[in-house]
Amino acid sequence: MNGSTNVGVLGVGQTEYVTRRTDVTFPELVHEGATLALADAGLDMGQVDAVVFPLAPDALIGVGNGERWCVEALGAAGKPFMRVNNGGATGMSAVITAWTHIASGMFDVVLVAGADRVSESGSAQSVLNKMWDVGYERPVPLNTITMLALSAVRYMHAYGSDEVDMARVTVKNRAHAALNPKAHLRSPVTVEEVLASRTLAWPIKLGDACPSSTGAAGVVLVSERYARAHGLSPAWIRGVGQNTETYWMGDRVGPRRVADHGDADAQGTAFQRAYAQAGLTDPARQLDVAEIYAPFSSVELHVIEAAGLCARGEAPKRLARGDFALGSDGCVVNPSGGVLCSNPIAVTGVARVVEAASQVRGRAGAHQVPGARTAVASAIGGDHQFYSALVLSDHLEEIS
């Protein structure tokens, strides 16, 4: 955005992700994530100019318009406050909204904070089924599992991949999550264990699927002006990109499809927009870390390719030889364990930014990628319909 103010991620925070929390109310959980992010930034709510609140479908927390329930818990009364909802992309859409608030010159310090309690919905997939057309697609019944099983089958047909390729994604991410004390699923698994897990919607098995997570996350964004005036060194947001896909599943899998459901071309456009703003021309070489949104193992295959980390159809072969894992050469994908190991839907995109920013600041702990300086984070929402990407770096100079 020409003439915009540079924006940095100064503070990040996230709770441990678990199946459920009975010790706090939802507003108290939101407060936890915000408090962690503010403490990391060295600020308090009195120094925050505005708040952006990510909240996915209300049914997942059981309270309509839950943002109203959380204003006082955040200490945000009297401040500009905006709710964002883009399904699974909600968290990153909220961060990009906060970035826009600051890049416009309107604010210097913006807090993004939220939470989710997915398991409390009783049946998250029943809730998510309601996003589809009532006459044609809801009765199938489509939900996020069956929708992405269709995508996995199309990818397998196009590129000759199989369930073992999907299982390798889970094995990699679980090994990474074992090093991340915040991750929900932290037990390493083998390819054989993934393949032996029960089928949810072929070829997706339980071992290929994300958990229903409870947890909170927050980030504090600041302007370059504010950072310079206070001698601060945030992770700089170098580029943002967003894109949308057709709503109709039939338009992705039929003979005259708008886009192929087996690929992630719309996500690829979001990546390219972020890369163009950041000045990245060779992401496979220039990126050290990719925290990408992939709630099922099959999704990671086509998002790796959409991110430009390898050619279309090559992700399975690259994963089989150990690429994209901690300790390998080149870009490491989901060193936190990713969405496959923690998915508090409303803040899953926030968590991707938390992890990417922590990596380029050298603060990711046991799952730190050595020498990481530039990272990309992504998110997907709706019926694989809303896409976003965000490039972060530890410096504002040209990315080499």
Image (spheres, grey):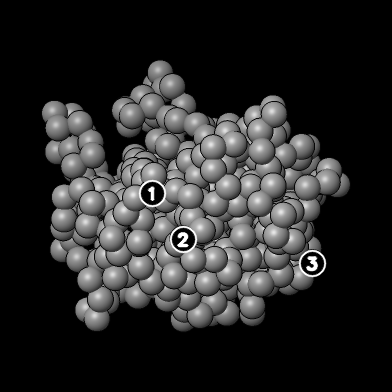
Three-letter amino acid code of the residue under disc 3: Gly
224 left or right, relative to 316:
right
Establish if 364 lies above or below 65.
below
What residue is at 35 percent from the left and 62 percent from the top?
74
Three-letter amino acid code of the residue under disc 2: Gly
Res 70 seen here: yes
* Residue 232 position by quadrant: bottom right
Between disc 3 and disc 2, the foreground one is 2
Q: CA distance from mark 3 to mark 2?
A: 35 Å
Under tag 3, what secondary structure? loop
Picture coordinates of residue 262 (x, y %)? 47, 38
Whichever of labels 3 and 1 marks the residue nearer the N terminus, that label is 1
Mark on residue 46? 2
Three-letter amino acid code of the residue under disc 1: Lys
> What residue is disc 3 on?
371
Under tag 1, what secondary structure? loop
Mark on residue 79? 1
Picture coordinates of residue 41 (x, y %)? 58, 66
